[in-house]
Image (tube, rainbow, N blue to C red):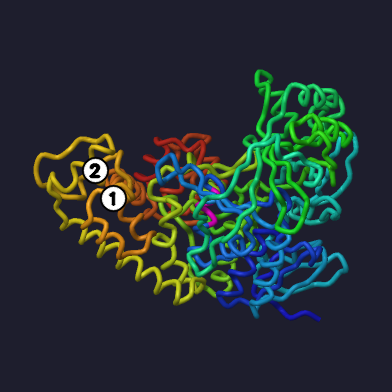
Amino acid sequence: MLPEYDVIVVGAGHAGCEAAAAAAKMGSKVLLVTMNMGTIAQMSCNPAMGGVAKGQIVREIDALGGQSGIVSDKSMIQFRMLNMSKGPAMWSPRTQNDRMRFAEEWRLALEGIANVDFWQEMAKEILVKDGRVAGIKTALGLEIKGKAVVLTNGTFLNGKIHIGEKNFGGGRTGEKTATGLTEQLVSFGFESGRMKTGTPPRVDGRSLDYSKMEEQPGDEKPGKFSYSDTKPLEKQVSCWITYTNEAVHAELREGFEKSPMFSGRIKGLGPRYCPSIEDKINRFAERDRHQIFVEPEGWNTVEIYVNGFSTSLPENVQHEALRKIPGFENAKMFRPGYAIEYDFFPPTQLKLTLETQLIDNLYFAGQINGTTGYEEAACQGLMAGINAHNKVHEKEAFILKRSEAYIGVLIDDLVNKGTQEPYRMFTSRAEYRILLRQDNADLRLTEMGHKLGLADDTRLEKLIDKRNDIKRLSEELAKIKVEPETVNAGLETLNTSTIQEKIAAVNLLRRPQIGLSEFKAINAEIASVFNKYPQEVQEQVEIAVKYESYIDREQKLAEKIGTLDAYKILSDFDYDRVKALSAEGREKLKRIKPETIGQASRISGVSPADISILTIYLGK
């Protein structure tokens, strides 16, 4: 009934949508299989995109030609650039989104790609022939042929939902669990495990008293994620902040004996950096309050997401505790929070392309790899979709280095280090974070995206214009000299030392007290030169000047480390022949099968001595 496809994507969450869109835009015939066409790109947890490190990932997805940034921009109700008091390596864009519009925009985007077909049904089995994937088999017994399969099952693989002492199968509240795939993959030799995540209750915004909360408005001049021509917001919706207290904590403790997390009914590990409210109270008993973010779910709904109150306690305990939070005294609950356990497959079983080691042309992306978060899932989906297309069409694999993108850091961490708990991206995970800023994602990645066939010609032309403008402004700035009498009055108002002789203007911009706006304000010539160029060009030049030595140092370190990635290791290399390797090093190398010395050096348990021995051996 259905034709043979180049790529079959199982699951239509953030990873599945990006995988399907990428492979199809590159020219593959794609089938997107989902158990429910009505929940494509559902924001299962909080209605927001981006945040610290996650915002950098969304900008990277967009720079490569993915869809998440565009969809986020089209559905946002608030924009904030986080960490503006810190250096530019820490600036992180975040949008609050309309949950319904986000899903709608993603579906419209997918339906607008001619190469994407849809099929609503559960994928029950993977079809495998001679060690290579051949398609899928559905719950109805339909066999659909495909040259590559990308599994993006999210929390649906044998998902179990917990609310107090109650538990039932489900991949999301109100949706059934997916069965069969885990058992089949384990029979093929894959190792599987269990993880846990959770979500807070949703409440009726009409029942809240916002006068008892702190308002959290969006930025005065809201930005956006995409480098394309999406429109910034003209009006925004505020979020709000309130706090728990001892009365809330006491109420929650009353339900601890019925907590599935404390009773041992939940076996999977939850995200360390996004704990449930009961876990916070238990682990941080010395704290008398915890922050609660009150987040609207959209433009035209009264539903509120209670961020910071993730819980799996009984629903009556949740309700009573909520009502003791300032502003929530009369709160009406739409639905309780819950925890969900699900199957995942340790990502050390993957190649850096996200293809599995055991079965050719089978790819894993998203929570199936042990990650948590929309952004982490979306970037894996993008990379899996790209590589599935390339493999089917006999093209070169696409792998991002740690020095090229946060996406490269994430995948490298997963494949080489694995994870014992839901993996979440942080800026601290990236050793080259001064290079990997949110503001320069297009400069780093758009040419790559264009070469792949994802970023269109308009994107490339825009990038070239921006690069040329940066070069021209840098050259003009280098020529400007300033006299004491033209700048000293301005320098005094900024509490920075005056100058005694004519100097290069660029030296003033290096001072920590002088930002771009102050720099332009102290001298008319400087202002006239800068104001000829777009704001993003001005900011790039400012960052390049202020952080020149740091950027150069990181670039040189990246180049030095990168030389190790030039030393290739054959896939069938016999590590048992290298007798001097440590036992743990040999075991890890045999299991992960690194493609280069550089990758081998990043595997947990492989020591510097092992790398030295291996390098000498391969050199011989």
Image quarter for residue 417? Answer: top right
Q: Residues within 10 Å of mark 1 (few under 14, many from 20)?
A: some
Mark 1 or mark 2: which comes first in sequence?
A: 2
Q: Residue at x 57, y 65 (%)?
A: 70
Relative image position of residue 63 (x, y in whole percent): 48, 63
Identify the residue shown where x is 54% and y is 59%. 353
Per the image, the residue denoted by label 1 is 521
Dots 1, 2 in contact, CB < 8 A: yes
In reply to whether residue 224 is colored magenta, the answer given is no
Residue 510, relative to residue 118: is it above or below?
Answer: above
Q: Is residue 620 visible?
A: no
Give the alpha-carbon distance from disc 1 to disc 2, as whole Å.
8 Å
- Residue 2 to residue 434: above or below: below
Q: Is residue 260 left or right of residue 219?
A: right
Q: Secondary structure at mark 2?
A: helix
> Which disc is residue 490 wearing?
2
Say whether residue 365 is visible. yes
Residue 577, percent from left and from top: 46, 45
Amino acid, disc 2: Gly
Number of the label disc, if any, that sits on residue 422: none
Residue that protrudes farthest toward the top in the picture: 286
Q: Identify the magenta region.
A: 54-58
Instruction: Name which residue type carries label 1.
Output: Ala
Quadrant (top left/top right/bottom left/bottom right) for the N terminus: bottom right
Residue at position x 54%, y 66% in the image: 231
Residue at 84% across, 40% down:
162
Nearest to the observer: residue 285 or residue 601: 285
